[in-house]
Amino acid sequence: MVGFEVDSHLQWSQWQLLDSILPTGGFAHSYGLEASIQTRIVTGPEDLKLYVIHVLDNIGSLLLPFVHNAHKSLDFESWSKLDRWLEATMTNEISRKASTSQGSALLRVATSVFAEVPHLKQLRDIALSSSGAISFHHAPIFGLLCGILGFDACFSQRAYMFMAMRDVLSASTRLNLIGPLGAAKLQHQIAPIAEQMVMKWMDRPIEEACQTIPLLDTVQGCHAYLFSRLFCS
Amino acid sequence: MGTTGIVVVQKVGGKSTATRCFSTYPLKLIIPTKVGSSKIDVVWIYSLSYGGGVVSGDCISCSINVEDDCSAAFTTQASTKVYKSIGSKISGQILEVKIGKNAFLAVIPDPVTCFAAARYHQKQVFKIEPDSNLVVVDWFTSGRHENGEKWNFEVYKSTNHIFLNDEQPLFLDSVLLDQTLAVGGIAESMCNYQVIGMLIFFGPKLKCIQSLVQDKVKKMMTAYYLTPARAKISPSLIASCNAFGLKETGLVVRIAAVTTESVYDFLREQLASIESLIGAAPYC
């Protein structure tokens, strides 16, 4: 009976973490979709599926190692090492700023929402008092948070891919590329492919973090050159 | 894996001098004396390969040490061709670089071209000081695309790591293109682009050129984005600039292009002003 209670409590927390109502600012970012549309790489809804798959592949190969390793050790030292390593790995300025703004928002929100877990607040306090030691990148904070809340490693990495897919599809509806129903259908179609990518990139050491879609990175970097734009990245 | 090449550049009588230059098969390093203006203090190092390319299973490992206050340029004579892999053997090149205080190194090679079925790994590690100066060009093409061979290699992996004061990570970049891992194949993720490249700048001597490059690229790309959307097709060359490092002291320019020649033109234009540091304009 006790086991069941723990389990149901975990599920409520998991759903809340992935709920788009959690104000972490994910919807300010298009993952390069806005720049790709204006660069005519994505020209219509028929290109969107492949675009989302490429974004997820690049996120899987580059960021899942950071989610995984942050989930593995929950102390400040390990976190700060991952954060510094990721700061040097995210050589794309636009993506780097998107990552630190979403990461710091997630930690701030999680600290007040999951107030029953003192470890979260302790880590945040140390980070805020050690001026500049932490850049608050999103992927390690997400892994850390999942670990502290007791979610398993597989969940944390799959959930990370789910959120990325959610955010890029949400951006595609606001860029009028696809309607809300079309986006929901696409989300369901891509899910099995995203799962393959989770399996492909999960549980890797950070030394293996890499980009797999270099064109995407070049185009994402052009976001700042756009004449008119809706999103931050 | 044994070292196949070593170069040490030190000050001798006030001049940058290659005090050590060793190379063995399959690598050949040569140090010509008259590459550019004799007024500029610099050592040019050319990397050549036997038969013009990297054969299946070749492992090339080279180290370059540019000591305090010295300048050097490291380049190739033609593109590095990576021939098809036999028995899934991987060919590889490793470059380990150390740059001293107030020293300068430009790594300005021609592109890597992996032929169909090639497997290639490249790793370049740069250990630098806060006032070291570095220019790195790293680029690769889709293969012999004029023969219709587009992104037909098996594996291409390129890693560029820059560490400050020995172990502080400053810039960590890895690209992996693997035919069996890529969803839908590599070619599909490239649209119609045939060349991918990266241009890295770091250091006080490159501050001016960095901001020049940033301005030029911004001008070029904003002009494209200002064109009305309906008349538009993808640009034949896309470039984007990203600052990196504490106080954004470094700059990386990423490039995707339809032709190799257009990237040569781009690099020639952006790097013209490092002539004052290495005595000759790159890619001319």
Image (tube, coloured by chain):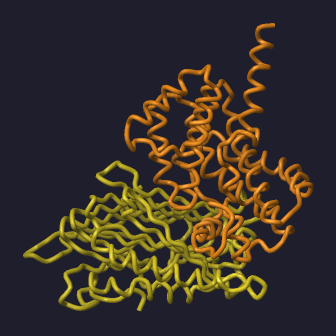
Chain colours: A orange, B yellow
Residue A160, compared with residue B246, is above or below; it is above
- Figure label count: 0
Residue A100, compared with residue A131, is above or below; it is below
Q: Nearer the viewer, residue B222 or B169?
A: B222
Residue A32, given in percent of the width and then of the height, sits at: 67, 64
In the rendered structure, the answer to whether residue A22 lies left or right of residue B275 reads right
Residue B106, given in percent of the width and then of the height, sits at: 34, 75
Residue A136, given in percent of the width and then of the height, sits at: 51, 43
Residue B50: image quadrant is: bottom left
Q: Residue furthest left?
A: B13
In the rendered structure, the answer to whether residue B97 lies left or right of residue A148 reads left
Residue B213, compared with residue A211, is above or below; it is below
Residue A157, compared with residue B217, is above or below; it is above
Residue A41: image quadrant is: bottom right
Please identify the quadrant where the N terminus of chain A is shown: top right
Residue B260: image quadrant is: bottom right
* Residue positioned 7% across, 76% down in the render: B13
Q: Nearer the viewer, residue B259 or B211?
A: B211
Residue B93, given in percent of the width and then of the height, sits at: 46, 65
Q: Nearer the viewer, residue A194 or A124?
A: A124
* Residue positioned 63% across, 84% down in the render: B224
In the rendered structure, the answer to whether residue B182 lies left or right of residue A138 reads right
Q: Nearer the viewer, residue B180 or A16?
A: A16
